[in-house]
Structures are given as structure tokens and as C-alpha cells.
Amino acid sequence: MNQPIRVFIVDNNLLFTEAIAAILDAREEIVLVGLAANLDGMLEKAPSDAIDVVLINTSIEQMDTAQLIQNIKEELPDVKVIVVGLSYREDDNLKFIEAGASGYVFKEGSIADLLRTIELVHCEQTPCSPKMAALVFTRIAELSQELGQGEMLQQAELTRREKEILQFIVKGFSNKKIAHHLHIKLYTVKNHVHNILEKLQVHRRQGAIRYAHENGMFKGFQFLRLLGNTSSSKLGQGKAEGLEKVNPVISTFLNRKIY
């Protein structure tokens, strides 16, 4: 028999907490660990390893709900947080997810929705409506763009001509072909290539191509062709790793099953 899910409720609305507590207490698959008005009260009443899921209400008054979620995740990183009473305000919903919430139940949701969410979240799954999924993936696209911009700032300071020549290197041009295309001397191209490799701290042209790829310097069909040996799954993995640097919660969301 599976171990029951240990749930703690954090809210300063006594009517809400007692009503939800009575419902959960009657379920065989759930054990109500305790009730508290804030995080400090929860930490005093239950050890960190005795809680699987924390329920919080968006109407809690003592602090910003997103900040409370973040504080809970900092103190108890393995605990899953479910936000109850969620509205359809897009900014708030994304803010709660980014703060570390693992699941949610809308104001219009039922007790059945709450029980299903607790079960799914405990099993490392994420219940997600089509509208919420659209919001999350829009945010992921924004984070991806922010990541690309951040990485561009970290790139080596190449001159305009060096960037131009690096782009030809990425396209697979030889030094001779670059010189012909730019109408400059071959030795001039060689000097530029030497400077590019030195600035990028790589020893060969392939290293420069890899650097350009990892930093998103040149995007287009010719670049994808040169990287044809790299599987789409690996490219996806690299993007997920980059997103994790920007926001680990969003990355975690991507790695879960969505229902």
C-alpha cells in the first residue's frame, strides 16, 4: 500500500483552513499534518521531512503570496506547493509558478480538482489547463530571448570585421574563399582568423564554430546545416539547460508531465 500524502495548510483564514482540513482529514490517501497562519508556524509544528505538499490560499494577508511560496521553497526545497483560489490574472499566475508553485486550483475549481491536483503534484506531475500552458510557454519564449541577449553581452569583443569573418567561418568558407568574397588579401584573412581564435581562446576553427553556436551569434539555415550532426534532442537539451540558468522553476516545469 502506498504511503499517504502528507499535507500542511498555510493560511490565516480560519474558516478556509478548517473547511479544507475537514475534507482532507476524511481521505484515506491523505494525512493532514497541520495548520498554520504563516511559514514560521508551519516550521514550528512539523519537521521538514514530515511534509509532502503545502496548500496556500492566494488571499493570505501577511505577505505577498509569491514571496511566501519562495520562502517555503527556500526552507523546504523538496516540498510541493499548491496555490488554491487562483484567479485568471495572467501576471499573478506566472509569478506564482516562477516563485516555485508546483500546482494550482482556480477559484472556480471543485474539491475533486483539489484532490486530483494534490495527487498529481505528489507524483511529480503538473496539472495544467490549455490556457495556463499557453501562458507558460509564452514566458519560456521570453526567457529564451533574454538568455540569448545575456549571452551576447558575455561574448568576446570582436571587431566588426572579425565578426564578419567569423560568420564566414561558421558558413564553412576557407580563408581563400573569405579573401575572395571580401576582396582582401589572404594574409589579412589569416591575421583576422588568428585574432579571432585568440580572443575566443580556442585553437581551431571548429572551436570558433562551436563558440558561435553556444552563444547564438549567427542563426540561420546554413548554421543548422553545419551542425547537422547534432541531433535535435541535443539542441533541445542545450536550450533547456540555458533556461535553467535563467529560471530553474520554468526548467523544472518543462521536465514534468503536463495534464
Image (cartoon, grey):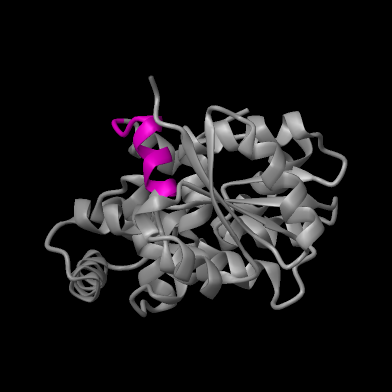
Q: Quadrant of the N terminus?
A: top left
Q: Is residue 146 visible?
A: yes
Residue displayed at 32% across by 60% down: 179
Q: Quadrant of residue 155?
A: bottom left
Most foreground residue, 3 or 209: 3
Q: Determine the residue located farthest toward the left in the rendered image.
A: 203
* Quarter of the image where the C terminus is located: top right
Q: Residue at x 25, y 59 (%)?
A: 208
Q: Is residue 194 left or right of residue 73?
A: left
Task: Write the residue at 39% across / 79% down.
Answer: 159
Residue 124: image location, x then y, percent: 47, 36
The image shows residue 150 at horizontal and vertical percentages of 48, 71
Instruction: Tell me if I can see residue 149 in this picture.
Output: no
Residue 111, quarter of the rendered image: top right
In the rendered structure, the answer to whether residue 180 lies left or right of residue 71 reads: left
Q: Which is the main secondary structure of the residues drawn in magenta?
A: helix
Q: Which residue occupies 69% across, 67% down? A: 65
Query: Is residue 239 in the magenta section?
Result: yes
On whether residue 122 falls in the magenta region, the answer is no
Instruction: Point out the stretch of residues depicted in magenta.
Output: 229-240
Instruction: Return the x and y of residue 209 as percentages of the image width and height.
Output: 29, 53
Vertical side of 98 occupied by 88: above or below: above
In the displayed orientation, state which residue is furthest to the top. Answer: 1
Horizontal and vertical percent position of residue 148: 50, 62
206 or 230, which lies in front? 230
